[in-house]
Image (cartoon, rainbow, N blue to C red):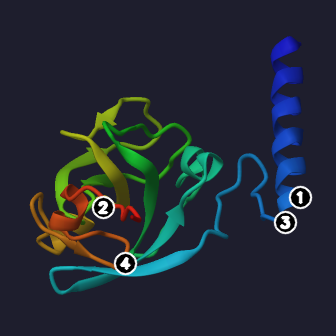
Amino acid sequence: MKTIRSFVSSVLLTLATAACAQIPVSPVGTPQMHLPRATMQVGRQSFSVQLARTELEKETGLMYRTRMPANEGMLFLFDRPGIQCFWMRNTRLPLTAAFVADDGTIVNLEDMQPMTETNHCSARPVRYVLEMNQGWFAHHHVRAGMRIRHALFRPAAAARTPARTAHGA
């Protein structure tokens, strides 16, 4: 009984917070389809992604979907690089996760099976994770070491160079 109350309280708090912020929220158990989108490119292939930025958006991810268009995926954005691990709870689609560095370079790819809780982790700290239908990367000859192009990704030199601040005299 306590677990049900806690769950209901959590859902109500999420809905109330979203209503106050005027952010659309998908009801629990339904796919989130309202996220902002971006178009990216890797090699010669363009594709569209939904951007998962908030904790709730990242937590929900591609859960509850029964299909996803061939050239579409979801990009998860984190505040800072870290070892990112993903699983497939309540996710019905077979997916591949591309773990992506600040400059857009794919660090590693991991195939993930539907409805499992096996962790699939980045080989090193990354800020982004891109999920696409399983087989998409292989079909387009995309592999680790290739770079995804989009303004979101910073060039390698900029990512390594510390910010400089000007000091007045």
**Going by the image, does 107 lie left or right of 129?**
left
Residue beneath disc 4: 71
Front residue of 89 and 41: 41
The three-letter amino acid code for the residue at tag 3 is Gln
Q: What element carries label 1?
A: helix
Crowd rating for badge 1 (residues with CA inside 10 Å; few <14, some 14–19, many 20+)? few
The three-letter amino acid code for the residue at tag 1 is Ala
Residue mark closest to the camera, 4 vs 2: 2
Marks 1 & 3, CB-CB < 8 Å contact: yes
Residue beneath disc 1: 19
**Comes first in the chain, label 2 or label 3:** 3
Query: Is 58 above or below relative to 33?
Result: above
Mark 4 to mark 2 CA distance (whole Å): 39 Å
Q: What element carries label 3?
A: loop
**Comes first in the chain, label 1 or label 2:** 1
- Quarter occupied by the N terminus: top right
Residue at left offset 39%, top offset 64%: 169
Query: Is 77 above or below relative to 168?
Result: above
The three-letter amino acid code for the residue at tag 2 is Arg
**Comes first in the chain, label 1 or label 4:** 1
Residue beneath disc 3: 22
Q: Quadrant of residue 139?
A: bottom left
**Comes first in the chain, label 4 or label 3:** 3
